[in-house]
Amino acid sequence: MSTRDTRREFEAIVGKLAAEDPSLARPVRMIPRRVLLSVLAVVGGLVWAALSVLMVVWGAVGVIITVVTVAVAVGLGVHRQRRLLSNK
């Protein structure tokens, strides 16, 4: 049996298994969710601290940068939440 035939047969088996149990078709996360959330929390805290310092050092320009950054972060969060809810 050639490599191409073996691959085709493998894909057929995987397709049948995924049809029987859709949870098998989900992508596997390489980084555990808990670790990912911890890293995001630390990075978010560092960014927030940097933006706070930026507001003090640069004054009005720092405030504008902070407002834009927070608005973009909130917008991305809302967009992601809507996308997740529409997929259910």
Image: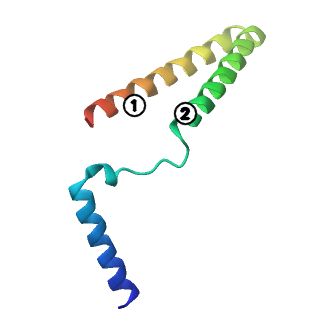
Disc 1 marks a residue whose amino acid type is Arg
Residue where numbered disc 1 is placed: 80
The secondary element bearing badge 2 is classed as helix
Measured from the top left, where is residue 19 in percent x and y? Answer: 21, 58
Disc 2 marks a residue whose amino acid type is Arg
Q: Residue at horizontal 62%, vertical 32%?
A: 39
- Asked if disc 2 and disc 1 are in contact, CB closer than 8 Å, the reply is no
Tell which of 53 and 7 is nearer to you: 7
Tell which of 2 and 85 is nearer to you: 2
Measured from the top left, where is residue 69 in percent x and y? Answer: 57, 21
* Quadrant containing the N terminus in the rendered view: bottom left
Residue 44 quadrant: top right
The secondary element bearing badge 1 is classed as helix
* Quadrant containing the C terminus in the rendered view: top left
55 relative position to 31: left or right: right
Tell which of 17 and 59 is nearer to you: 17
Q: Is residue 40 above or below residue 45?
A: below
Q: Is residue 16 above or below residue 57?
A: below
Residue where numbered disc 2 is placed: 34
20 relative position to 63: left or right: left
